[in-house]
Amino acid sequence: MVVIVEIEQDEQDLKLVEAEIANEEAQLIEVVRAISEKSGIPVEELVLDLGVGDVRFQPDARVADCLRHGHRWRHRRVCIDLHFESEEARHTFPARATWSVVHKWGCHRFQVPHDACANLELHEASPKGPVLNDHVQIGDFKGCKTAWLVKPGPEPYGRLR
């Protein structure tokens, strides 16, 4: 049996990846590994947003349970244009990933030491834009969203009058 996974980026760019399923009683993670090899997307990113319609598959699900929803599955990715000081990098992330994944990726990409990374914040659109909560999902949107990895400034309400 064959499963087709549609990898969606920006709601227009669809990449189709086929995976052969030999055993419907196997765990979903086994199929995800095969999809990962063919697509080049890490397993941990694929399982964050894999499903059919509004149904999201759990990593520990059985393949048979997932197949009840159909043989055409979808993985959604969104583009983030991340800035740090004078550097910038674009990457696609699962739409259901949290901003902490972007934060971690940015620190690794820009080679920020671990202890310094913990003190940085993600800001939306500009270095002075609103702070992005690391525990909130990135969400689904068109285009490429800009975020900045910045050192937090002084507390605006922390001063004595």
Image (cartoon, rainbow, N blue to C red):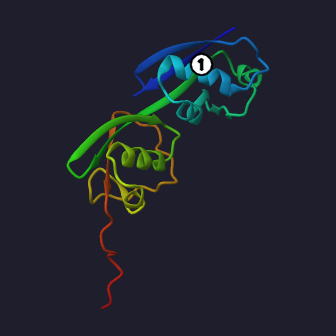
Seen as rendered, the residue at the extreme top is 1
Name the quadrant of the N terminus: top right
Seen as rendered, the residue at the extreme right is 25
Residue 78, image quadrant:
top left
Q: How many numbered discs sit on the rendered protein? A: 1
Viewer-proximal residue among 95 and 118: 118
Seen as rendered, the residue at the extreme left is 86
Amino acid on which disc 1 is placed: Ala
Q: Is residue 85 above or below residue 96?
A: below
Which percent across, then down, holds residue 86? 20, 49
Q: Is residue 137 above or below residue 1?
A: below
Which percent across, then down, holds residue 107? 37, 49
Tell me which residue sits at (73%, 31%) in the image: 61
The residue where tag 1 is placed is 34
> Of helix, strand and loop, which one carries label 1?
helix
Residue 114, image quadrant:
bottom left
Crowding near the residue tagged with mark 1, few <14, some 14–19, many ≥20 C-alpha atoms within 10 Å = some
Tell me which residue sits at (51%, 16%) in the image: 38
Residue 35, image quadrant:
top right
Which percent across, then down, holds residue 20? 64, 10
Viewer-proximal residue among 110 and 158: 110
Name the quadrant of the C terminus: bottom left
Which percent across, then down, holds residue 47? 59, 32
Left/right of residue 61 with respect to residue 126 in the rendered view:
right
Left/right of residue 53 with respect to residue 99 in the rendered view:
right
